[in-house]
Image (cartoon, grey):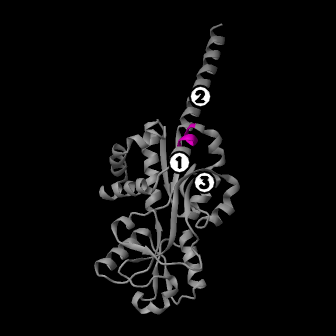
Amino acid sequence: MRKVMLAVLAVVMIGVSACQSNQSAEKKITIAYVNWAEGVAMTNLAKNLLEKKGYTVVLKNADVAPVFAAVAGGDADIFMDAWMPVTHKTYMQNFGEKITVLNTNFEGARIGLVVPDYVDIKSIEDLNNAKAKFGGKIVGIDAGAGIMDKAEEAVHAYNLDYQLQPSSEAAMLATLKKSIDEKQAIVLTGWEPHVMFSQYKLRFLEDPKKVFGESEKIQTIANNEFTIRDTAAVNFFRKLKLNSEQLGSLMGAINDADGNEAAGVKAWIEKNQELVNSWE
């Protein structure tokens, strides 16, 4: 009888352990992100709020192509910075069958070529006539980014005699700052929302051929299996949405914290508790 009882107890303990293991697994979320200001801001905001709900949140940083592959393949659960219908159209076509769109977290996004407001040209069509002024260079971000593909298309569509220079976002912003400090002309790949528009007076060059498309939206996407596995987290991500003022202030709070995402997010939440409560 004692052996039977021990056997039963062992089975129960195994069951409890398995249950605890499953609960632990369900309380872990991996969010992939690219080093773009708006995505970094939203990702760290989600991390803060999910950790308060008892989740272990793992952040995975990569270029955009590996990020989409990771979400589709299950190596990451969530990506909060998918730009549609133009910028990331190809990635959604390639991986869409394994990905679920949970939410449009930001409306009215935009991509294009950007110049400081003191630069006198108005349109992409005018760039060739000002090649010497810009040194024949368009300063870009990482080569795999959707905006770089569109910028390459613009070079061909407008027959621009310019070199598109890939770099990191940080390097591009450093070049922008130096150019503005010295009142030099610069043209770069830009997107809004971005904290640079609150730091400097910038404007998009007109795009009469609509290479960069019209207004875009930023979406939160998830691995298909994750959407079934953790409906509570899915509901959280479906509610998390920011307008231009809210996202701009979030990026600004991180910038004011000298790039310390955790500190910036914490300060922002304290000032926006009513909004945060609406996502519960």
Looking at the image, the residue that sits furthest to the top is 1
- Nearest to the observer: residue 224 or residue 239: 239
Q: Which mark is residue 30?
A: 1
What's the residue at 47%, 40% (across, down)? 278
Q: Considering the numbered disc 1 on the image, is that residue within a helix, a strand or a loop? A: strand
Type of secondary structure dominating the magenta stretch: helix
Residue 86 visible: yes
Looking at the image, the residue that sits furthest to the right is 97
Q: Earlier in the sequence, mark 3 or mark 1?
A: 1
> Please, is residue 29 above or below residue 261 in the view?
above
Q: Quadrant of residue 238?
A: top right
Q: Quadrant of residue 64?
A: bottom right
Q: Considering the numbered disc 3 on the image, is that residue within a helix, a strand or a loop? A: helix
Residue 119 lies, in percent from the top left, at: 38, 82
Residue 160 lies, in percent from the top left, at: 54, 88
- Nearest to the observer: residue 75 or residue 219: 219
Tell me the CA gap for discs 2 and 3. 26 Å
* Amino acid at circle 2: Cys
Q: Considering the numbered disc 2 on the image, is that residue within a helix, a strand or a loop? A: helix
Residue 219 lies, in percent from the top left, at: 56, 55
- Nearest to the observer: residue 209 or residue 81: 209
- Left or right: where does residue 82 sit relative to residue 139? right
According to the picture, the residue beneath numbered tag 2 turns out to be 19
Magenta span: 232-236
According to the picture, the residue beneath numbered tag 3 turns out to be 71
* Amino acid at circle 3: Val
Question: Which-is-in-front pick, marks 2 and 3?
Answer: 3
- Left or right: where does residue 174 sit relative to residue 136? left
Residue 56 lies, in percent from the top left, at: 48, 41
The mark total stands at: 3
